[in-house]
């Protein structure tokens, strides 16, 4: 029985990693075209301006949505797995009422705080009016995030995949012409239009599956307390995590230049967002599954270990290929003006090895609804990240930012594994450390080789090491399956 469960878990992880990895791959391919065109049209300064607006929006969104899009997944997943249709409908209706209130309050708050956000974000010009015009985006994105959480909780992953791909296609078709004809003046309307399209695509599916029955009353203040309590922890934690990103981007804008901010944003996007094709399955599939067994310590530990093992085996070759191809990818995806960011991106890729090992374990606090622990862990990590990144930049420029993020990842990895072991009796499997001992040194070797230039002596060993990494991961996975009688 246990072997069958392990096989099922491995297959589930691979299945949805394949589905959403492929989806993210297609999304990234379209995003590559879009980013390339945007970079050519607006240049690093325009890319930096977009990142400032986006970081401000994400910061305010996290602070105003009560953490509902994440906290609700636990509650709705439990109702769905209990196969209680009536309870599920009731929980969804309750969740939508809270989401609507949060969306309205967040929009008003963003509008009122526009003058303050302008002063914090920009050291030049007056962008208060731009923030005011952008305020409806908080309402749009809050509702969209809420309805997306419903789809994740009831495992409507195919529908979610279709929505995602259609949205990125529309983003390409509409945003690029706007930037071409209006330049930087088209940034605000483009952000609003893309967000609105995603909202329409999402509610078209969720309202058909679960028709809305909103009846605002004092009842919502008495029910859903667990959801709101955990959600408020997300708000505070989001204040720190998104606030850290907000502070870092504002620091670069004021201390360095909008140009360097654009370079930072390109390097950060290339490494963390594009590799998100692998990590996206954690929130979409793994988190709901883990939430459904959160009261069973043994099953939780086994599920976490399987996820860490498979995620790392898949991540390692991908990261090595990304590290190797950076000198080609950056000019291809952006332009040669963005080449100075290679050093930072290389260091961040090493940090992503640690993230692949850490992230599945970090979801334990969410799955168990441990709001206080989640808040403390997120807050300390955000503060450490700001200090490390600012210090790294002051010492070594953009590359120093990469080292700051790497330092944060290593410390966070140690803290999360130690905490999970003491609080939840989590015990990492020996396979995790075996895989890490095999794959991580290969990535470090490529990183060292990359510091000495990108001639023939770089390409040959780096390509060979990447192939070796792929062979190792495939061999280990096939051996796992053979051991459990699949072949």
Image (cartoon, rainbow, N blue to C red):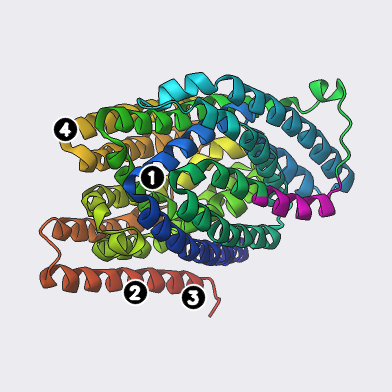
**Between marks 3 and 4 in the image, the one whose residue lies nearer the viewer:** 4
Residue at the spot 48% in from the left edge and 58% down from the top edge? 277
Residue 46 is labelled as 1
Structural distance between the alpha carbons of marks 3 and 4: 50 Å
Estimate how packed mark 3 is, as few (under 14), some (14 to 19) or many (20 or more) residues with alpha carbons within 10 Å.
Answer: few
**Between marks 1 and 4 in the image, the one whose residue lies nearer the viewer:** 1
Residue at the spot 21% in from the left edge and 50% down from the top edge? 340
Residue 482 is labelled as 3
Do the CB atoms of the residues marked 2 and 1 lie less than 8 Å apart? no
Residue at the spot 18% in from the left edge and 59% down from the top edge? 445
**Between marks 3 and 1 in the image, the one whose residue lies nearer the viewer:** 1
Q: Is residue 200 magenta?
A: yes
State left or right for residue 10 relative to residue 94.
left
Judging by the rendered image, the residue that carries numbered circle 4 is 395
Residue 471 is labelled as 2
In which quadrant of the rendered image does the N terminus lie? Answer: bottom right
Do the CB atoms of the residues marked 1 and 4 lie less than 8 Å apart? no
Q: Residue 475, image x and y in percent?
A: 38, 74
What span is in magenta?
197-211
């Amino acid at each position: 029985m246990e072997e069958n469960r392990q096989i099922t878990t491995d297959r589930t992880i691979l299945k949805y990693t394949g589905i959403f990895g492929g989806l993210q791959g297609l999304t990234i391919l379209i995003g590559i075209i879009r980013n390339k065109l945007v970079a050519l049209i607006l240049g690093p300064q325009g890319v930096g301006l977009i990142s400032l607006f986006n970081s401000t929006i994400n910061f305010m969104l996290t602070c105003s949505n009560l953490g509902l899009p994440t906290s609700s997944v636990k509650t709705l997943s439990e109702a769905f797995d209990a196969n209680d249709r009536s309870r599920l409908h009731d929980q969804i209706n309750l969740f939508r009422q809270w989401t609507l209130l949060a969306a309205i309050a967040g929009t008003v708050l963003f509008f009122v705080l526009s003058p303050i956000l302008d002063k914090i974000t920009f050291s030049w010009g007056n962008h208060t009016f731009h923030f005011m015009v952008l305020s409806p985006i908080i309402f749009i994105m809050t509702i969209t995030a809420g309805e997306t959480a419903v789809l994740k909780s009831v495992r409507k992953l195919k529908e979610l995949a279709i929505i995602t791909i259609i949205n990125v296609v529309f983003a390409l078709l509409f945003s690029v012409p706007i930037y071409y004809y209006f330049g930087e003046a088209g940034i605000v309307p483009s952000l609003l239009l893309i967000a609105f399209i995603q909202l329409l695509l999402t509610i078209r599916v969720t309202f058909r599956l679960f028709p809305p029955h909103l009846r605002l009353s004092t009842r919502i203040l008495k029910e859903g307390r667990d959801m709101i309590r955990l959600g408020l922890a997300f708000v505070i934690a989001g204040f720190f995590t998104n606030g850290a990103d907000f502070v870092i981007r504002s620091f670069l804008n004021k201390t360095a230049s909008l140009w360097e901010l654009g370079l930072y944003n390109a390097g950060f996007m290339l490494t963390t967002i594009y590799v998100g094709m692998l990590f996206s399955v954690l929130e979409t599939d793994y988190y709901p599954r883990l939430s459904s067994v959160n009261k069973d310590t043994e099953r939780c530990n086994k599920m976490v270990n399987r996820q860490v093992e498979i995620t790392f085996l898949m991540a390692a070759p991908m990261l090595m290929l990304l590290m190797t191809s950076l000198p080609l990818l950056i000019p291809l995806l952006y332009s040669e003006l963005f080449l100075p960011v290679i050093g930072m991106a290389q260091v961040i890729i090493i940090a992503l090895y640690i993230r692949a090992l850490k992230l599945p374990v970090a979801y334990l606090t969410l799955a168990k609804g441990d709001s206080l622990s989640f808040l403390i862990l997120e807050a300390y990590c955000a503060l450490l990240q700001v200090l490390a990144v600012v210090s790294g930049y002051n010492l070594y420029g953009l590359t120093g930012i990469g080292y700051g993020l790497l330092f944060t990842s290593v410390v966070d990895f140690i803290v999360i594994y130690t905490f999970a072991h003491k609080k939840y009796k989590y015990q990492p499997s020996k396979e995790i450390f075996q895989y890490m001992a095999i794959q991580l040194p290969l990535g470090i070797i490529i990183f060292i080789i990359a510091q000495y230039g990108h001639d023939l002596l770089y390409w040959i060993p780096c390509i060979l090491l990447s192939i070796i990494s792929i062979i190792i991961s495939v061999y280990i996975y096939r051996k796992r399956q053979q051991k459990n009688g699949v072949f």
